Image (cartoon, grey):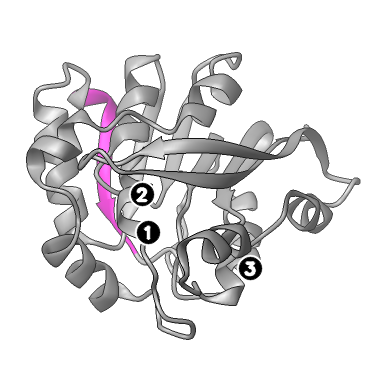
Amino acid sequence: MSEQAVRREGGDPAGHDFDEAYWEEHWQGRAAGPEAVHSIPPNPHLAREVGVLVPGTALDAGCGAGAEALWLAAHGWQVTAADISAAALARAADRAASSGVAQRVRWLQADLSSWAPDTQFDLVTTSYAHPAMPQLEFYDRIAGWVAPGGTLLVVGHLHAHAAQEEGHQPPADASVTAAVVTARLGDAEWDVVTAEELQRTLTAPDGRTRSLRDVVVRATRRA
């Protein structure tokens, strides 16, 4: 389970704001402890989808406590890791200190609903990030940060599935499908490589398990 999943799973009431105050409170009061954070592996879809790419520059949009960013750095990428939560970034920097690849990651506190980079990246990836804006508009924003010939990797949750199983109701606009995400990209500018909805079993740091349905979209921006 990635750090993003730790912080973003969990019965949030419909209609709340995914703003800085929300994520700071979430990280400070509810996120897993430091030992658990350090033991959490990166999202499994990242290695599968990105492992075939030639490393370059990468943006991890909504990096949480840094598992995905550090995986990228360890595999040769020069990473900008952005998150709205100072508490999350503090955990990430602490984890990076013992990783051996800290020099390949730049940690950046940023509101992804308004911040924009001054460059494009060979890879833009996001795993379960929910900023204070409609989910699909967020994907539109980060898609524009991919350089020609670069890759966009979106990993999200099909929340309707989780809500039915867990008895909670996440915000409706936080749920996406692979078909809707790929339709937003358009055929003229993007080649879709992966568009899947995959079910997997997740084991939390406390040993509990739950079934998740992930939405995975990887696309290459035409040069």
Q: Amino acid at mark 1?
A: Arg
Q: Is residue 106 magenta?
A: yes
Name the residue beneath numbered marker 2.
Answer: 4
- Residue 81, by quadrant, is top left
- Residue 114, by quadrant, is bottom left
Q: Secondary structure at mark 3?
A: helix
Q: Which mark is residue 8?
A: 1
Of discs 2 and 3, which sits in the foreground?
A: 2
Name the image quarter holding the N terminus: top left
**Which percent across, then down, holds residue 39?**
20, 29
Name the residue beneath numbered marker 3.
Answer: 137
Highlighted magenta segment, given as a residue range: 103-110
- Residue at horizontal 28 percent and vertical 25 percent from the top: 104
Of discs 3 and 1, which sits in the foreground?
A: 1
- Residue at horizontal 25 percent and vertical 38 percent from the top: 207
Q: Is residue 103 left or right of residue 45?
A: left
Callout count: 3
Q: Amino acid at mark 2?
A: Gln
- Residue at horizontal 9 percent and vertical 28 percent from the top: 97
**Which percent across, then down, holds residue 58?**
46, 33
Relative vertical location of residue 15 with respect to residue 43 in this rendering, above or below: below
Task: Characterize the local packing of mark 3: few (<14), some (14-19) or many (20 or more) Cα atoms within 10 angstroms.
Answer: few
**Which percent across, then down, holds residue 65?**
24, 44
The answer to whether the residues at label 3 and label 1 have Cβ atoms under 8 Å apart is no
Relative vertical location of residue 205 with respect to residue 159 in this rendering, above or below: above
The answer to whether the residues at label 1 and label 2 have Cβ atoms under 8 Å apart is yes
Task: Characterize the local packing of mark 2: few (<14), some (14-19) or many (20 or more) Cα atoms within 10 angstroms.
Answer: many
